[in-house]
Image: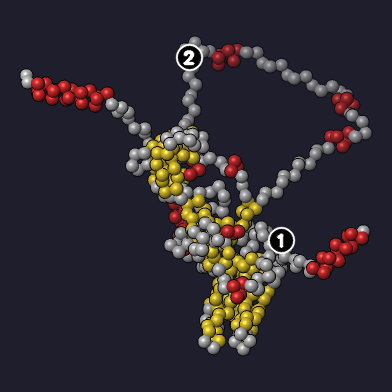
Amino acid sequence: MSFRTLRLWVVGACLLLSSCSSDQRPKRPVLGTAWVGPISVRIRQEISPKSPVTATLAHGDKVDVLEQRRTFARIRTADGHEGWTEVKQLMTKEQMDELRAFTERAAALPSQGAAVSYEPANMHTAPDRNSPSFFQFREGIRVEVLAHKLAPRLPRASTPTQRLLPSKPKPERKKSPGDDSDGRQRLRPPTAPAPGLPANWRELSKTGENEAAATAPKPPPEEPPVPMEDWTLVRAKDGTAGWVLSRMLVMAIPDEVAQYSEGHRITAYFAMAEVRDDDRVKYDWLWTTLSQTDVPYDFDSFRYFVWNPRHHRYETGYIQRNVIGYYPVKVTPGAQPEFSMILRDDDGKLYRNDFVLQGYRVRRANKEPWTPPADIAVTRQAQGPAQAEPPVDRPGLIERMRDRIRRWLK
């Protein structure tokens, strides 16, 4: 045998031994399926946050669930990378289907005006900080306002961890061949009855004159109020819909109209009739405003502005304050614009009020009962308190100074 042939035999034997000694561990079995919820998620080699990152996933990526340990899950990506992430970053099939149906319903809702954010804002799947944030739009990007909801601000610890995998059944306890505990239980003598109360137990229980006060049930301690947050349902240009904190948004109405808001938050606005003023084109505007925060309704005042070409300024054609109003506001712009408002009347019921512009005056044309449809925009309206009172006007500066002087003199 030549030296060249011997060398080939040695190299082949080494390759064979290395392939046999290599780690051919079987893959972990797939126990479930999940989808990535947030915009991006990093999975790590171990549960520790200092562990190296094995892969970065995006919203909607499908992964295989291999194991779940309390609030963490071991997953495998489509290209075979495995790692750990928090369970709250993953969504089940039911949650993904609900999110798709939610987007379809939001696509049919009428816009209540455009809004912008002066910093990057996150969209959530629900009006809750603990829900997945699956989309983020940059500052200055316009989104359409669709609905509003007042939701409690829940701490992170109050959100239960969902189960991505079915719970394992508890193993049945097997009896040993010599275990006769059931037989010994049957042969045990019956338990003696407890001794009865003495005949004078009422006299023995008396503690004095304050007996009634001591034995009276104490009222349960009052729980602290849950902090509430305002959320707004918005729709991006590509049709993506989600919930954003209302304080992150500002309605994009022109400044020449927004300056009349008197410090109130504009919640909806619409361009109505077109007006010619020499070589300029102006519009009449309709808006709704809210003077308070953390309330279950959408606006407490609405106002119609008309452009006066003679004086070259905006004037109030109609205004109504101290109302309880809800989305959606529907408008029909044009030469004779019309709009309708959903308002709660003194009897606690909801009514749709139709208004029409005639010349420079707005008048109510119709009023009829209104039942909220079963969609995401108005489901919380039926849950709102029917006994909510209209906002009270704040006293003026002079009146507040008088009250302060009276209190000081006392």
Occupied quadrant, residue 369: bottom right
Which part of the image, by quadrant, shows the N terminus?
Answer: top left
257 and 339: which is toward the camera: 257
Number of residues whose C-alpha sits closer than 10 Å to that of mark 1, classed few (under 14), some (14–19) or many (20 or more): few
- Label 2 amino acid? Ser
Marking on residue 341: none
x, y percent for residue 278:
54, 88
**Left or right for 81, reference 134:** left
Q: Which amino acid lies under the numbered mark 1 shown in the image of this protein?
A: Gln
Q: CA distance from mark 1 to mark 2?
A: 67 Å
* Left or right placement of residue 400 versus residue 151 in this view: right
Q: Residue at x 90, y 26 (%)?
A: 203
Q: Quadrant of residue 79?
A: top left
* Residue 69 percent across, percent down from the top left: 49, 33
Left or right relative to 329: residue 76: left
Look at 43% across and 36% down and name the residue there. 52
| Near-viewer residue (225 or 101) | 225
Identify which residue, 30 or 343, lies in the foreground.
Answer: 30
The tag on residue 387 is 1
